[in-house]
Amino acid sequence: MASPENKVVSLRPDAPMVVPDRPCWGVYENWVTNEKSRRLRPGVYWHGFKRSGADDETDEDKTDRPIIDEWIATPVTVAARTTNSEDGSEGRFLRLATESGTKEWIIPMEVFGGSGEDARRQLFGMGVIIALKKRGQFMEYLLDQRPDQVFATTCRPGWHESGAFVLPGRTIGSDKVRYQASGKGQNLFSLRGDLEGWKIEVAAKCEGNPVLTLAIGCALAGPLLSLVGVLGGGVHLVGDSSSGKSLAQLIASSIWGDPGIFAASWDMTKGGLEIEASGRNDTMLPLDEIKRADPKRVQEMAYSLANGQGKGTMTREREGRAKLSWRLLTLSSGERSLSEHAAIGGNSAHAGAELRMVDVNAGTRAERAFDKLHGLAGADFHRLLTVAVGAHHGHIGPAFVEKLLASNDRPGLLKDFADVRAKFTEDNAQAGRVADRFAVIALAAEMAITYGLLPWTQGSALADCQLLYSEWLDRVGSGNAEDRQILAGIVDFIDKHGSSRFSNVDDQTVDAKVFNRAGYWELVGTKRLYLFNKSALTEAASGYGLSRVVKALEGAGALAKRDTDRDSRKTKKYRIPGGGSPRLYVIDSEAIDGEGGSV
């Protein structure tokens, strides 16, 4: 290939003639012959004249001077100018002809403000060879190019503002948008094997296994989230060690790339987690082994993943760096639930965090995490699928997006989601958010079945998601999640401290054995009512304000007595042993148990 300044006259197929408009640059991807019949190997050239040394040289004299063809580098063509969609920064789109094949790379214009050493180092790493004494001239060549074509670039995978879906090395839906790598990180979205092999050896074995079909649907649902208006979040596979949770994550990871690279771990900082999430935007983030996460920060990390917004930071010049952002579903796993792991660090469970990372039973099914082994022993089933996802991966995710873009039916997609969502019932807004998540997972899997990408019976993926959603509802019960958490905390507090921090309010003498008093108790018939002081009540429902705790107790009908001298009274005045008449909150723990507070 020659640069636009040159004329190429084909003399013979293996070495066409070029007639450069000297002085100029030239780029050739094959052998060529110059106007003096000198053969030139492929590469970037400076076509000029030898210097005569005369100061009064005329243009006519120059045409008679000996010509020179300086080899600068292996073929590097500046094919387009680029503009980054996130920050507006410009670059150049390079096409590299290397011994291992043609490659693409985007060089930021900012590198020309320095020596360009880092850029040349990366080019060498990709197979480009630059003459050592021509390094500066090579940078001049790149800077001199002014191609007419302009590409948009982005450093984040997923949906682009143009409507294209961008992946490293591939853009679906546009030939004018490219992914711009920000460093030397591994390519998460690699390909191996083929789609048919994955369908036969992996997907077919997953049918009849709700945990596995959920994992696949979770991976495919990423591109749908923004299109149907569902917020991010995740599902957390809970089960004993070696139950099959990790296999589900490997299978889900194979939707987009090499499972060994695409899958991530909870064992990282919150900042690292944000980078991993942003690097998988509009796809899925698999996080293995929650026990590796910091118990003190795991709930905060769950909130961050679901909200899709990283923490703002500043440069040394005190300028704000752009926040990382993403929208995806997280597929987590662990032997403990999110709240159980947080409790290890001394933190009480936050209902909001648990709703953003919903527990799914992946340990006590018919075959631990599985329901159907397709005639195989458990170990053989696990081994067969593990080998299969290593041999075939990275195909179905992009194929799903291709089909989605080809259908180009946003109204129809919204209607389909509404139809599926109607099959997931809920009794409050919080359960509704979880229902949204299960519904979009089911929709993605059912769409893939319709597209012919999953060899499953139509409706089977929806039935599996409905089953797992109903199991979740049965575990957590109905009603508001914060109410359940508050009531459970109060019941636990009574179980732990009922005999050590409470005493009979009708005793005539002070019970000296009670330290750090939480209140009193009184018998009404055969029922014991607990009379909490204000500080103990907020201690029992750690993380919630007093008014919120009282609201939950009222909703459960657990405030057994109150004074009636004022409508707003929630307390009752008692005369206590040793003197004094404090106002106390009178709680019927049996009423709380009836509301599911002990769950």
Image (cartoon, rainbow, N blue to C red):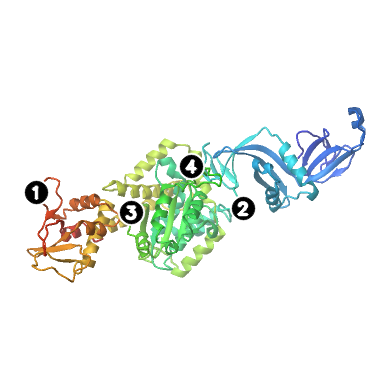
Amino acid on which disc 4 is placed: Leu
Q: Are marks 1 and 2 in contact (CB under 8 Å)?
A: no
Looking at the image, the residue that sits furthest to the left is: 525
Amino acid on which disc 3 is placed: Tyr
In this picture, residue 507 sits left or right of residue 312: left
- Of circles 4 and 3, which is in front? 3
Which secondary structure, mark 1?
loop
Q: Residue at x 48, y 57 (%)?
A: 269
Going from N to C along the chain, the mark reached first, 4 or 3, is 4
Residue 524 position in % (x across, y down):
8, 62
How much space separates mark 2 and mark 4, taking CA atoms? 31 Å
Amino acid on which disc 2 is placed: Lys
Going from N to C along the chain, the mark reached first, 1 or 2, is 2
Q: Residues within 10 Å of mark 1 (few under 14, many from 20)?
A: few
Which secondary structure, mark 2?
loop
Q: Residue at x 43, y 44 (%)?
A: 225
- Of circles 2 and 3, which is in front? 2
The residue that mark 4 highlights is 404
| Residue 14 visible to an observer of this rendering | no
Going from N to C along the chain, the mark reached first, 2 or 3, is 2
Q: Are marks 3 and 1 in contact (CB under 8 Å)?
A: no
Q: Residue at x 49, y 45 (%)?
A: 323
Which secondary structure, mark 3?
helix
The residue that mark 2 highlights is 184
Seen in the picture, residue 164 relative to 204 is either above or below; the reply is above
Amino acid on which disc 1 is placed: Thr
Residue 515 position in % (x across, y down):
21, 68
The residue that mark 3 highlights is 469
The residue that mark 1 highlights is 564
Seen in the picture, residue 242 relative to 476 is either above or below; the reply is below
| Residue 493 visible to an observer of this rendering | yes
Q: Residue at x 68, y 38 (%)?
A: 79
